[in-house]
Image (tube, rainbow, N blue to C red):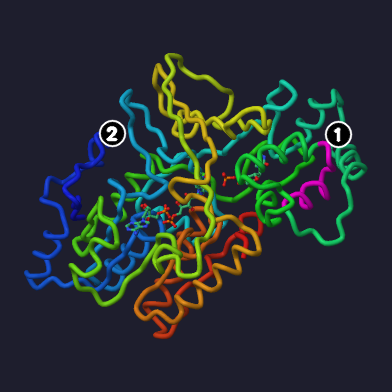
Amino acid sequence: MRREHGNGKEPSEEMPPGHGSNGRDGSVRSALQWRSNGRNFDYLVVGAGFAGSVISERLAAGLGKRVLLIDRRPHIGGNAYDHYNDNGILIHRYGPHIFHTNSREVADYLSRFTRWRPYEHKVQAHVDGMLLPIPINLTTINRLYGLTLNSEQAEAFLAARAEPVDDVRSSEDVVISRVGRELYEKFFRGYTRKQWGIDPRELDKTVTARVPTRTTEDDRYFSDSFQNMPLHGFTRLFENMLDHPNIRIMLNTDYRDVGRAVTYEAAIFTGPIDEFFDYRFGRLPYRSLRFQHETLDQKMVQPVAVVNYPSEQVPYTRITEYKHLTGQAHRKTSISYEFPTDGGDPYYPVPKSENLQLFKKYEALADRTPNVQFVGRLGSYRYYNMDQVVGQALALYRRMSGSRTRPAILHETANLSPMTAASS
Ligand code: FAD
Ligand code: UDP
């Protein structure tokens, strides 16, 4: 892998050994030198997250193409980037990233670049002064109401409270039709209002439908068949994936800086699609987060990796304790708070029909734009998990290596479960 740093900026000081510069003079200038040495690029890939890294690796290793991969951030990995902080604790800079999938293809592909550590994600919600399992399960119901129901009785309990909804459309409909209004208000309404800045009634049903309801004691957040964390972290996985002589990487480099400076046959864009087209039809809404990272002088602080705070009296949505995710042994512990915001980096497309309509205008424009493919969570404006983005990039690669005609945005992903299927 050739790693470069554009715009004269240095890589983040927080990068752990092996995550930093390779010491090369990095900039658009170096890429130009590469070109003048007879090394034109076949592809410019914008964004070094899962979408951009997977397609870069496939084009380089699978088709022998020369790829210039750029990112405006000072690191690879996109939002899945992790690093060792000043105390030597491995943390996720952009909030908790837990890998889970039902796709054998995606798991097999990523397994080429990492070994795995078994990890099943657990989350608790702070409700009525208690820490209770979320997704709502048998334990949640029994502890919240001081009952000793079995699974069958819990099903009847929820059925008696569930409110029939003829046409389940919104994120409120999904929850009240499953568990009724009281549990909805305790676990979902406040969290969703904080997270999205709008009422669940205005949000597509696919958002809260990501969280199942159970009447067993199963307290795992995900039900997928493959639940593992990369043994040495996500950034190491990305480094291994991008370690190919045909891949040139430039960090701290915006698409606009490089556009005319290097030549390439075609581009793959994984940033926000509305930004690519200069917001021609208006801005697509995104929700952002502010992360507050802290290290505490104690071994562990909370019983599970993530504690959710649905109350609107609390300004953050959740606290993550990273050592649960990584299994790292350390005498201190690092946590992060998530404060949802409108401004800031675009983290979440907002699944809502009017936003989808606006996106469709950009999608039509993308289809008319030659030699650019859009992929990834921001490129296709979909609330995709990591495995879905990997599946989407692999599907794009299959199309690129086979058929010549293709839409600019592919929404198909690898064989994924209905539980994790994204909105459309
Ligand atoms: P990104 O990771 O966003 O990468 C896009 C990259 O493009 C960025 O690095 C950006 O800097 C760069 N870029 C954009 N525009 C430009 C430009 N003009 N020029 C140069 N570079 C540009 N998924 C899971 O499966 N499990 C989880 O537990 C999970 N937790 C999450 C928690 C949070 C708080 C968030 C925000 C997301 C979470 N996700 C999770 C989703 C996951 O982050 C995404 O599915 C995945 O990272 C998307 O990859 P991507 O490559 O499409 O986009
Ligand atoms: N949600 C909620 N309460 C919870 C957990 C989730 O209301 O305790 C809702 C909320 O709207 C959230 C959505 O369900 O945005 C999806 O949750 P998920 O944990 O998948 O969110 P992510 O990890 O993608 O931020």
Q: Position of residue 12 (x, y in %)?
A: 26, 38
Q: Residue 405, position in %: x, y? A: 43, 85
Label 2 CB less than 8 angstroms from ligand 1: no
Q: Write down the residue under mark 2.
A: 14
Q: Which quarter of the figure has residue 216?
A: top right
Q: In this picture, is 68 found above or below 234?
A: below
Which element is circle 1 on? loop
Q: Residue at x 60, y 42 (%)?
A: 195
Q: For residue 181: magenta? A: yes
Residue reaching furthest left? 37
Q: Residue at the location (60% across, 66% down)?
A: 356
Q: Is residue 168 left or right of residue 161?
A: left
| Residue in the picture at 44% in, 22% down | 333
Q: Residues within 10 Å of mark 1 (few under 14, many from 20)?
A: some
User: Within 8 Å of ligand 2, the CB of disc 1?
Assistant: no
Residue labelled with disc 1: 150
Q: Which dot, 1 or 2, sits closer to the camera?
A: 2
Q: Amino acid at mark 1?
A: Asn
Residue segment shown in magenta: 171-182
Nearest the camera: 109 or 48?
48
**Quadrant (top left, top right, bottom left, bottom right) of the N terminus:** bottom left
